[in-house]
Amino acid sequence: MQDQLQIMRTFMRMAWLYRWAGLSAALLFCLVGWSGVLLLPDQYEVSAKMYLDSRSMLRPLLRGIAFDSTTLEDTAALLGRTLLTRPNLEEVARRTDLDLKAHTPEDFDRLITGLAHDIRVTGTTRDNIYEISFHHPTPRTAKAVVDELLNRFMESALGDTRHETASTRKFIDAQIAGYEKRLSEAEDRLKAFKERNLGVMPGAQGGYFERLDAARSQWRESQLQLQEATRSRDQLRAQERAHIAANPATASGDAELAQLDTHIHELQTRIDELLLNFTDKHPDVLGMRKLIAEFEDKRSARLKVLKKTPASATPATAPADSYLAQLQGQAITADAQAAALQARVATHAARVAELEKKVGTVPEVEAEFARLNRDYEVNKKQYDELLQRREQAALSQDAEQSQEDVKVKIIDPPRLPLLPIGPNRLLLASVVLVLGLGLGGGLTVLLSQLSPRLIDVPDLRETTGLPVLGAVSLSVSSSHRRQRRYELLAFSAGLVGLLLVYFAQVTLFLLDINVHGRLQHVLGALT
């Protein structure tokens, strides 16, 4: 610990030897720095506050049927993005005559960069209050810039939206005209195509292969119906032949025999009806069966007589058998139905053959027809959608013209500032003082390290590595002590004077005395 204190003491004593150089550097730096701080131009800030009001009755009423082209978020985004674009800043510089100070393109570029840096746009979406501020050495210029920015925003927020809506509507009208022309051309192509391929166009039954499958199905179904009708006719003919074989009276035409057959048939029918409700032992059933047996005996006897009697002796006026007539009528109907089905089968077969002949052409026609229809539907869909959008755009434009959706209210207009807001000369003067003292102290340390000296006996012993046998003390005279005292007082006076100048500046700044303005006036009078 003792060694460290000795080293620190030696270090400070070496730096003390160059105190005048450090003090001179600190005084020079502080004087130059404070002069620069005093000569810094004043900065005047101008600001304007606006309120974005989106309370409109049209927005909820038109939701879903018109475009919401101007929303609060879009307007706020427009405020933050478009105001600081280079073309907008260039226009502001020209309208406020700031460009007159730029004599070269480089100067103009620095001017625009400085504008973008000095203009601030702040605000919150919670209360919808936004502020535009700008600071400049000339208060009138600062106010002119803020006024121009405010006007530019008002024009962009309220005028550009309507212009954009009108441009959008004009564009939609041009697109509708183009699609209307395409739609007319597609309709003409479809019409000409249908006229060229009138007999092979797909109908309600579908395409070619669907119609071919349907024709084949109808052909097979008509063939099946023809087979069923043929079988039914053949069965009726067989029943007719069997009935004639079982009832010779039908063929001979004998009236008595036919009458007996009719009675037998009627009795048998009545027995069948009775058996549905009674048994075979029922008296009526037994009685009718007895009558049937009697009629059958008479019929057998009559057949024997007819066999012995020549055919020419048989009466020709015998009544016809009604059952046989019924069978014959059904057979005739079956013949007619079979003939009709044969004609239908032939028609379906010809239809199938005709379609099979067109297997190479009809699919191509249908494919081309589908392509034409697809093009037409695409154009029709786009055309209908554009019509709907044009109506929405027209409704939106009418709504914007009748009432502003987002209102911009200036709640704090820009005013000409009377007092500057900067620069903060008190802070800058303090920084200059700290830097000056640091520069002086650093210079003394640097010089002491560049030209070291032996200060004490331990330094000599450490530097030479030899033992020190003794030391001769310095005998200071009264004149020398007086001189050292004067030097110390002069050094202290310089340091105290530096601090007094600083505190004097602080006092002037705190009293709001415009030292900068007076200094500028003096310099202006001298020049």
Image (cartoon, rainbow, N blue to C red):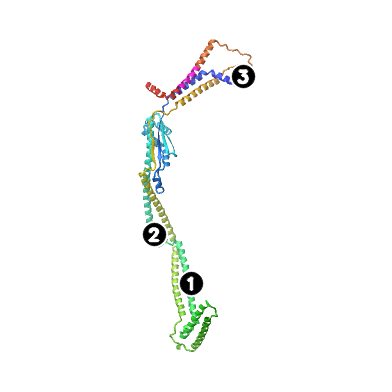
Q: Amino acid at mark 2?
A: Lys
For marks 2 and 1 on the same chain, the one whose residue lies earlier in the sequence: 2
For discs 2 and 3, the disc positioned in front in the rendered view? 3
Dominant SS of magenta comes to helix
Q: Amino acid at mark 3?
A: Glu
Residue 462 badge:
3
For the point 56% across and 19% down, which residue is it?
A: 14
Residue 112 badge:
none
Pointer 2 residue = 194
Q: Secondary structure at mark 1?
A: helix
Q: Is residue 177 above or below residue 428?
A: below
Residue 209, image x, y percentages: 46, 62
Q: Could you say which quadrant of the image residue 3 lies in?
A: top right
For marks 2 and 3 on the same chain, the one whose residue lies earlier in the sequence: 2
For discs 2 and 1, the disc positioned in front in the rendered view? 1
Instruction: Locate the C terminus and report the quarter of the image it occupies.
Output: top left
> Which residue is more in the foreground, 339 or 272?
272
Instruction: Locate the N terminus and report the quarter of the image it occupies.
Output: top right
Q: Amino acid at mark 1?
A: Glu
Residue 451 appears anywhere in the view: no
Q: Secondary structure at mark 3?
A: helix
Question: Which residues are drawn in magenta?
Answer: 492-506
Residue 302, image x, y percentages: 49, 87
Pointer 1 residue = 228
> Which residue is more in the foreground, 225 or 508?
508
